[in-house]
């Protein structure tokens, strides 16, 4: 039991609150839902398909607003959302 004269460690200090370990870095920024461009992973999540399906649709020219940047693809969020609103989604060939 701690007495008034004792220096007791506060629970916040014990848990590491208020102090930063100099070896830790902040997490990298996450793309916001409002970002004007989307990655293939974000497109796949939005369309609820796998990445391979997105790459195949890009190769067929089915997804509007897609640009190749180096070895990656980026899509205009606005173009993709407009495409979905307009219902220009292709039909399955099965």
Image (cartoon, rainbow, N blue to C red):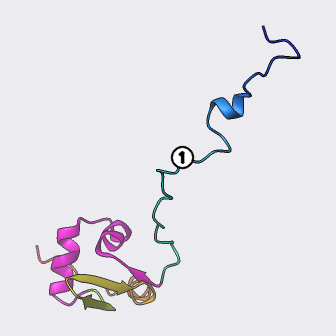
Is residue 77 rendered to the left or right of residue 68? right
The residue at 26%/83% (across/down) is: 73
Depth order, front residue of 47/9:
9
Give coordinates of residue 57: x percent, y percent: 20, 81
Residue furthest toward the top? 1
Residue furthest toward the left? 94
The residue at 39%/82% (across/down) is: 84
Give coordinates of residue 77: x percent, y percent: 43, 84
Could you say which quadrant of the image residue 50 lies in?
Answer: bottom left
Magenta-colored span: 36-62
The residue at 15%/86% (across/down) is: 59
Residue furthest toward the right? 4
Question: The residue tagged with tag 1: helix, strand or loop?
Answer: loop
Depth order, front residue of 35/55:
35
Q: Quadrant of the N terminus?
A: top right
The residue at 49%/79% (across/down) is: 35
Could you say which quadrant of the image residue 75 lies in?
Answer: bottom left
Magenta stretch: residue 25 in it?
Answer: no
Look at mark 1 in the image and give the residue it sits on: 21
Could you say which quadrant of the image residue 13 lies in?
Answer: top right
Check the image and report above or below for 71 versus 23. Answer: below
Give coordinates of residue 22: x percent, y percent: 52, 51
Is residue 72 rendered to the left or right of residue 86? left
Give coordinates of residue 5: x percent, y percent: 87, 17
Is residue 53 visible to us here? yes
Depth order, front residue of 51/17:
17
Is residue 87 visible to us here? no
The kind of secondary structure the magenta stretch mainly shows is helix
């Amino acid at each position: 039991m701690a007495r008034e004269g004792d220096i007791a460690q506060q629970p916040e200090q014990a848990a590491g609150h208020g102090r930063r370990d100099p070896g830790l870095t902040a997490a990298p920024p996450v793309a916001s839902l409002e970002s004007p461009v989307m990655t293939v992973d974000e497109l796949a999540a939005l369309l609820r398909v796998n990445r391979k399906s997105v790459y195949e649709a890009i190769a067929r020219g089915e997804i509007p607003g897609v640009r190749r940047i180096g070895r990656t693809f980026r899509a205009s969020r606005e173009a993709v959302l407009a495409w979905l609103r307009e219902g220009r989604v292709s039909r399955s060939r099965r």
